[in-house]
Amino acid sequence: KAGVTQTPRYLIKTRGQQVTLSCSPISGHRSVSWYQQTPGQGLQFLFEYFSETQRNKGNFPGRFSGRQFSNSRSEMNVSTLELGDSALYLCASSLVGTGDGYTFGSGTRLTVV
Amino acid sequence: GESVGLHLPTLSVQEGDNSIINCAYSNSASDYFIWYKQESGKGPQFIIDIRSNMDKRQGQRVTVLLNKTVKHLSLQIAATQPGDSAVYFCAEILGNNNDMRFGAGTRLTVKP
């Protein structure tokens, strides 16, 4: 069965631009969570979506947003990019997202120049 | 070899030795814990999990121990192999809100 698919794998953007990242969860999984991974801050929780609703949110500014579609695919958007947004963005999917195991994608490496 | 908490992010062991990676979690209300392995260029990969009503859980070559009294989690890897070289993260899940928080990670290096 296919795993969690994130696209694109690599992205280079300029400061001030915006970016949209995509995550396709494992078939049947309805919960999608997003994480930012940097060498300095480690893995930090961005938000979680379940059945097209944001169910939980981490401590990131409003420039970070997301959404989930009826097929459970999710996108996250970062507006007005800053150099500090350079990171590996990971998404994880699970069946219902209440401790039933999470599967991660390989991530999107975003570089802001 | 043994690492202590999140202040010693690197652990180096000899192939064939046992490894112990430790993690201190933050919230006494956390009821589910997961250990992940992350290799270079890949996302975290599930290794083993444990719920708060258990003290120990064993998998293939791995054992997770949970001490709720001191909010401590450890991952033991038996007969460590070069393929075990990676960064290991513990994660705690806070109740039913799917808020999974990760530790800083420990880099395990296995010397042949």
Image (spheres, coloured by chain):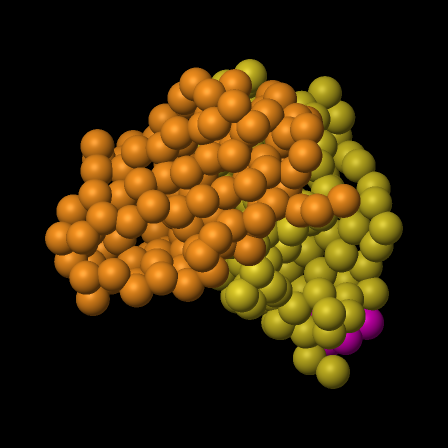
Chain colours: A orange, B yellow
Q: Position of residue A36 (x, y in %)?
A: 39, 47
Membership of A53 in magenta stretch: no
Give the residues in magenta.
B13-17
Total labels: the figure holds 0
Above or below, comparing residue A111 to residue B56 in the picture: below
User: Which residue is more in the foreground, B62 or A107?
Assistant: A107
Q: Which quadrant of the view contains residue A76?
A: top left
Q: Is residue B46 visible?
A: yes
- Residue occupying the far right of the picture: B60
* Residue A39 relative to residue B79: left or right: left
Q: Which quadrant of the view contains residue A60?
A: top left
Residue in the image at 54% along x and 29% along y: A72
Please state, as top left, top right, bottom left or bottom right, where the C terminus of chain A lies in the image: bottom left
* Residue B105 relative to residue B49: left or right: left
Above or below, comparing residue B83 to residue B4 in the picture: below
Q: Position of residue B49 (x, y in %)?
A: 70, 36
* Residue A59 relative to residue B41: left or right: left
Q: Main secondary structure of the magenta part?
A: loop
Q: Is residue A43 visible?
A: no
Residue in the image at 51% along x and 50% along y: A6
User: Which residue is more in the foreground, A92 or A10?
Assistant: A10
Q: Position of residue A27 (x, y in %)?
A: 68, 34
Please state, as top left, top right, bottom left or bottom right, where the N terminus of chain A lies in the image: top right
- Residue occupying the far left of the picture: A16
Residue in the image at 34% along x and 46% along y: A20
User: Which residue is more in the foreground, B101 or A21?
Assistant: A21
User: Which residue is more in the foreground, A35 or A41?
Assistant: A35
Residue in the image at 69% along x and 79% along y: B111
